[in-house]
Image (cartoon, grey):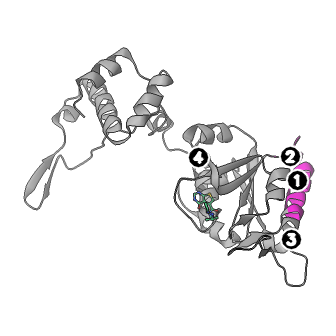
């Protein structure tokens, strides 16, 4: 799959491609990230990419013309590379729909997208109306632009490519794969001493009873989710992810 990234700050994407879990996805070319520096498409003498908003007010607006030129170059390149259709255009914007793991999974199985990183107050609405297929937000807090959201999306999608994650089974156990938060994890030492207090690993995990361990982990997941993110319990219930046994356990919980 490929991501074509339109950005005023291409240098923010450089270190991402050389480190971490996603590196394998880039090395084996299962995720091809192409950067399109927006300033390269600003033809006027000042290489302007923004201007003041009609109607007044503080903050600058990203100009249509450089964006149209960049998108045209991307779509010409996509056709040249033999893509049967132009990839959908995703705008990162605080006014978008929040990103979910379900959306990440569907993108991971797609041929890719154009990722448009906004800066300043926003983008001329006419470019959005004419060319943007989807607007995505990371959540209800204010960032300085769409670059970190684009990196976040690429990271989330890249780790789902076959052969990228160390252990395919960890996909299944991920927080959110069945809509519940993860259970706690423990490793050596068996007893940890902190400020003179001994902290043991839950003994059941040392028992070797795999069925008991699986039950304990499931109950931990249900407990932690019900306490921290009760709305996720209702969503899991509606998607059929909760068994009768899960429901029985949830009734015993004093939140
Ligand atoms: C921040 C653009 C503030 C515009 C109501 C009135 C992309 C982002 C961004 C940015 C404003 C994402 C407003 C979560 C984010 C992004 C830059 C001004 C705000 N709302 N996900 N005024 N948060 N942010 N408008 O900030 O480009 S995805």
Residue 120 appears in which quarter of the rendering?
A: bottom right
Ranked by sequence position, the earlier of labels 2 and 1 is 1
Q: Main secondary structure of the magenta part?
A: helix
Ranked by sequence position, the earlier of labels 4 and 2 is 2
Quarter holding ligand 1 = bottom right
Crowd rating for badge 4 (residues with CA inside 10 Å; few <14, some 14–19, many 20+):
some
Q: Residue furthest left?
A: 196
Residue at the spot 77% in from the left edge and 46% down from the top edge:
133
Label 4 vs label 1, nearer the camera: 4
Is-magenta flag for residue 86?
yes
Q: Secondary structure at mark 2?
A: loop
Q: Which residue is mark 4?
A: 99
Q: Which residue is mark 3?
A: 41
Side (left or right) of 22 relative to 133? left
Question: Pointers 2 and 1 in contact (CB under 8 A)?
Answer: yes
Side (left or right) of 94 relative to 205? right
**Label at residue 75:** 1
Mark pair 1, 3: CA separation = 14 Å
Q: Which residues are magenta?
A: 68-87
């Amino acid at each position: 799959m490929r991501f074509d990234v339109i950005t005023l700050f291409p240098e923010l994407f450089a270190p991402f491609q050389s480190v971490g879990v996603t590196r394998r996805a880039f090395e084996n070319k299962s995720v091809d990230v192409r950067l399109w520096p927006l300033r390269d498409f600003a033809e006027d003498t000042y290489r302007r990419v923004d201007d003041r908003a009609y109607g007044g007010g503080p903050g600058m607006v990203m100009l249509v013309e450089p964006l149209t030129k960049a998108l045209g170059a991307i779509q010409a390149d996509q056709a040249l590379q033999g893509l049967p259709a132009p990839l959908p255009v995703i705008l990162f914007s605080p006014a978008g729909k929040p990103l979910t793991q379900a959306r990440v999974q569907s993108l991971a199985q797609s041929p890719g997208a154009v990722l448009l990183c906004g800066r300043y107050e926003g983008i001329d609405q006419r470019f959005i109306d004419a060319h943007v297929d989807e607007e995505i937000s990371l959540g209800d807090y204010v960032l300085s632009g769409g670059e970190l959201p684009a990196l976040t999306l690429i990271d989330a999608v890249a780790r789902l490519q076959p052969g990228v994650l160390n252990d395919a089974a960890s996909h299944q156990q991920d927080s959110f794969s069945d809509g519940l938060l993860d259970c706690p994890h423990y490793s050596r030492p068996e007893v940890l001493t902190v400020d003179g207090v001994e902290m043991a690993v839950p003994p059941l995990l040392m028992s070797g009873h795999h069925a008991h361990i699986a039950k304990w982990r499931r109950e931990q997941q249900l407990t932690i989710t019900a306490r921290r993110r009760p709305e996720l319990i209702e969503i899991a219930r509606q998607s059929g992810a909760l068994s009768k046994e899960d429901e029985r356990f949830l009734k015993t919980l004093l939140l």
